[in-house]
């Protein structure tokens, strides 16, 4: 077989293999390259973004931006061949804003492929259709459930763990993905898959909440503004920078607990990976809002469960027994039944600030290695211990804050090491 490439091969490549081996190698490389570059993830692809599953989807408010090509994935996230590595299904990209120029965007499917499939099958089942039904047909059957029953909704996700009619109404009212009759379906589907978009819209960044800015949804993707580098990348920063972050994290805990007139928000999953640091103002942001529990304080005042108006201190039994990363002790009942609960402060001190904080095999906490003039009187360490392992000292975290706040101010003139 006189192939055009064989003379070429003989002339330029004198590798110890024959012409046909060379051809096989070329074919394999070509196939790999075409797989990598030929089948790209594209935000314009209705199948890839899950638009065909609507109304069993997260919404349609940003479909124009998705389908018109204004939103783009960054290089590595376009390679479909690599999707199997992306278990959490989070993609990075950008879009061009007329006022701000290029904005870095995170696209999220909010669950793993398996979790999405399991929910689809459950929705089909609940609608009385076969397990592998077209889920876009299944969702209409139970759209009304949520209007009738807060108890049912409370089992779906942490946001509604403490059932309250006002909370459900408020979340639905703020949910911007409700074009036409499909709105309730989007709301229901989102609550059941992952309530993060519901939280981001009910407690928006524009009103000072420490969450990423929600942009919109199309099919089974949401788009949020990239909130900045992860908190984990700051564990090696100079002490005064970490002290400022620690103070801001306690401010964040305070904000979630008390700043809203009606609702208290409690973080149930506090890890270094779940926070980012805003590159503009340097403040921490909770980027994973799946496990946020919301308490309607008015509901507590009316229902008056036992001990409702006593200040509640978190327990941290299990302490010193089994070392575990980012674990927290809490109970839904104690969170739901109290007006004043120290959970957020405890969670921040226990999992991020204190000496017992552990993450990815590392132990130490954000406030380790304080300069001697701070640690000299031992007060910071005592306060941190009290905050980490609360024992009837609700005020400890609030005392830690001025302490690290002061040292931050003293150091403000010091350049980063
Ligand atoms: C499901 O049904 C919708 C509407 O009837 C349709 O547009 C979509 O293509 C179907 N999806 C599949 C996977 O068959």
Image (spheres, grey):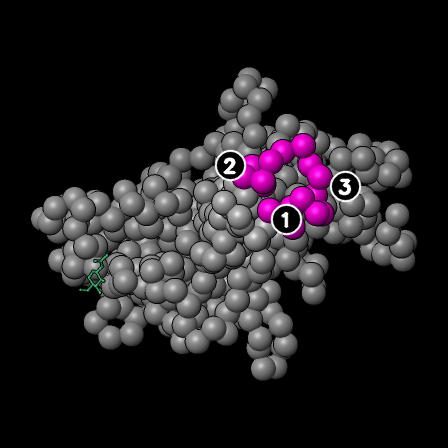
Query: On screen, 328 above or below 217?
Result: above
Q: Does dot 1 land on a helix, a strand or a loop?
A: helix
User: Alpha-carbon neighbours of circle 3 within 10 Å: few (<14), some, or many (≥20)?
Assistant: few
- Identify the magenta region: 6-22
Return the mark for residue 7.
1
User: Alpha-carbon neighbours of circle 2 within 10 Å: few (<14), some, or many (≥20)?
Assistant: some
Q: CA distance from mark 3 to mark 2?
A: 31 Å
Given the current orientation, which residue lies at the most extreme top position? 321
Return the mark for residue 236.
3
Q: CA distance from mark 2 to mark 1?
A: 81 Å
- Percent of width and height locating residue 376: 86, 34
Q: Is residue 399 visible?
A: no
Q: Residue at x 63, y 48 (%)?
A: 7
Q: Residue at x 27, y 68 (%)?
A: 183
Horizontal side, residue 31 vs residue 100: left or right: left
Sequence-earlier tag: 3 or 2? 3
| Viewer-closest of 280 and 62 | 62
Q: Which residue is mark 2?
A: 313
- Percent of width and height locating residue 4: 57, 53
Horizontal side, residue 320 vs residue 86: left or right: right
Sequence-earlier tag: 3 or 1? 1
Label 3 CB, ligand 1: below 8 Å? no
């Amino acid at each position: 077989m006189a192939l055009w490439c064989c003379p070429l091969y003989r002339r330029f490549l004198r590798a110890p293999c024959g012409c046909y081996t060379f051809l096989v190698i070329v074919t394999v490389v070509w196939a790999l390259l075409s797989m990598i570059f030929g089948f790209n993830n594209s935000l314009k692809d209705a199948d890839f973004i899950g638009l065909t599953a609507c109304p069993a989807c997260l919404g349609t408010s940003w479909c124009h931006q998705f389908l018109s090509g204004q939103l783009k994935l960054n290089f590595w996230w376009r390679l479909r061949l690599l999707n199997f590595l992306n278990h959490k299904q989070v993609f990075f990209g950008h879009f061009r804003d007329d006022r701000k120029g290029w904005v870095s965007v995170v696209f999220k499917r909010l669950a793993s492929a398996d979790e999405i499939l399991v929910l689809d099958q459950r929705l089909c089942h609940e609608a009385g259709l076969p397990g592998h039904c077209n889920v876009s047909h299944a969702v209409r059957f139970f759209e009304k459930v949520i209007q009738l029953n807060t108890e049912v909704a409370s089992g779906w996700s942490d946001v509604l763990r403490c059932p309250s009619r006002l909370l459900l109404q408020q979340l639905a009212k703020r949910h911007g993905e409700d074009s036409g009759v499909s709105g309730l379906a989007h709301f229901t589907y989102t609550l059941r898959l992952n309530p993060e978009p519901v939280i981001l819209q009910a407690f928006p960044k524009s009103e000072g909440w420490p969450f990423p800015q929600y942009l919109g949804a199309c099919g089974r993707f949401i788009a949020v503004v990239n909130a900045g580098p992860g908190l984990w990348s700051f564990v090696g920063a100079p002490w005064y920078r970490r002290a400022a972050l620690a103070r801001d994290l306690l401010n964040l805990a305070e904000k979630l607990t008390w700043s809203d007139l009606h609702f208290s928000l409690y973080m149930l999953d506090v890890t270094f990976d779940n926070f980012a640091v805003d590159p503009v103002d340097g403040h921490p942001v909770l980027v994973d809002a799946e496990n946020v529990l919301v308490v309607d304080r008015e509901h507590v005042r009316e229902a008056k469960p036992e001990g409702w108006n006593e200040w509640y201190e978190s327990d941290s039994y299990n302490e010193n027994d089994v070392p575990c990363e980012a674990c927290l002790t809490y109970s839904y009942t104690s969170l739901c039944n109290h007006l004043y609960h120290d959970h957020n402060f405890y969670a921040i001190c226990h999992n991020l600030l204190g000496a017992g904080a552990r993450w990815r095999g590392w132990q130490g906490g954000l406030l380790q290695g304080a300069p001697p003039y701070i640690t000299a009187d031992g007060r910071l360490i005592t306060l941190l211990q009290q905050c980490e392992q609360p024992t009837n000292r609700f005020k400890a975290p609030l005392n830690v804050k001025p302490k690290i706040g002061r040292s931050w101010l003293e150091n403000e003139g010091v350049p980063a090491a």
